[in-house]
Amino acid sequence: MFDQSIYIKRRCRLKQRVRSGLVLFLGNEESPMNCADNGYHFRQDSSFLYFFGLDFAGLAGVVDLDEGTVAIYGNDLTIEDFVWMGPQPTIRERALAVGVEKTGPCAALKELLKAVKAAGRKVHFLPPYRAENAITLMNGLGVAPDKAGAEASVELIKAVVAQRAIKGPEEVKEIEAAVNTSVDMHMAAMRMVRPGVGEAEIAAEVHRIALAAGGDIAFPIIATVHGETLHNHYHGNRLKDGDMFLLDAGAESALHYAGDLSSTIPVSPKFTPRQREIYEIALAAHEAAAGALKPGVKNLDVHLLACRTIAAGLKDLGLMKGDVDEAVRQGAHALFFPCGVGHMMGLDVHDMEDIGEIYVGYEGMSRSSQFGLKSLRLARELRPGFVLTIEPGIYFIPELINQWKAAGRFTDFLNYDRIEAYKDFGGIRNEENFLITADGKRLLGKPKPKTIEDVESIARI
């Protein structure tokens, strides 16, 4: 937890953005794995953490903008709970630690919400992503669970995005700690990669390092020889000569701030000539995108720069043809790069994605429906204090290649005869995390090996 003054200031800023009504922040509950007493690892709601800082289940925070009060609701534990959990602070003791004096049990929150609704007052809440919170809204406000997202407060969403998007120095410090641990995770994986090693063995060591640092992983580990599958969480393969191993993994700090890095490593001692050529193109796109980061630049333009760099490189290899700018405008390059160049990062690895990317990444702008471009999570103008990832990649997805080839798509730009020889190639990406500063950007954390020479040397130590 940060100092209580930070949470008090955050709530005060919120009051300046949302002027009237009652603001409700629902914390998360324990989530049973297969019975009530055997739960998944608890993860608090990130917006609740941001404004109230309490990393415990069963809590809700209320900011009454009309009365000028702040309260935390939750049930104190019983003696039977203490038997299993040991002594625990009371709700009031926890609330005081974050500068909140008013507390009450969960039943009081339910009655409060009913009274506020009966009085016709506005209740602001964020879109719920947990079923139990949707039920709380139904019981207290009569909001149907399937309507809760649509009835969430756009005013509150915009206010929360405006605050959480700009990272304070205490947040940057936490993110950088998570990134440093993430680099350690990737370095360990690079040293393990060799023929005969199992994907699961590497994933286990990567997870161990995150836990040993006092936190956990920020998202399920991607550790695979099939990097062409963008979110591949299967870890059942064994590495063999000629493979490339892709690791996408990040640590989450004890205060739940995320790191998010990707690396691609040859399983053989060296990249093959074909692997080297594609890796260099992907790395050039990465460096071009990172070099373009600064305040006032739209991340959409950073993305398109990476796309053009990839298309130009693949044209040099004979995989693409024609006018590069027109190929990118029409989306032909998305055969190889069907996703976005990066995303916001903070208390969530995809920061505030539960609130809605149209507000987080687009600031109300319309979103493209074009394949590939529609998957760009962050398109808006960059501002000092933003933390984001840069992660362009090149992927040869056999099913996608077969479909586009059969449909005759983009034959003016794609050399399918040449592409056929790459259908067994896999996928490549590097990923790093950046802070937008007043005059540019700063790489967060210690550098991760990413040149061919550095990757090959680290992998063989």
Image: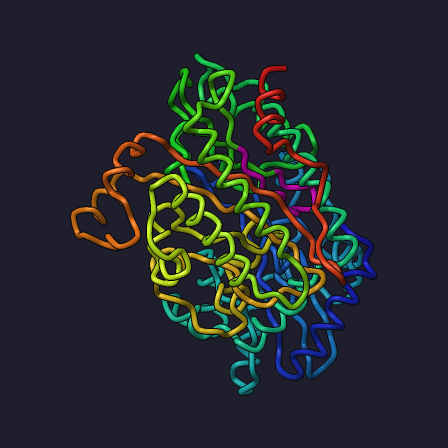
- Can you give x and y, in whole percent of width and height, for residue 97 in the image? 80, 55
Location of residue 134 (image quadrant): bottom left
Q: Is residue 254 magenta?
A: yes
Q: Is residue 170 visible?
A: yes
Question: Outermost residue toward the left?
Answer: 406
User: Is 203 in front, or is 39?
Assistant: 203
In which quadrant is the C terminus drawn?
A: top right
Residue found at x 53% / y 24% = 204
Q: Is residue 293 magenta?
A: no
User: Is 437 in front, or is 33?
Assistant: 437
- Can you give x and y, in whole percent of width and height, for residue 364 in the image? 50, 74
Residue found at x 44% / y 44% = 313
Residue 291 sits above or below residue 268 on the image? below
Residue found at x 56% / y 82% = 122
- Can you give x and y, in whole percent of width and height, for residue 358 in the image? 48, 68
Residue 93 sits above or below residue 62 on the image? above
Classify residue 169 as left or right of residue 358.
right
Q: Which residues are magenta?
A: 251-263
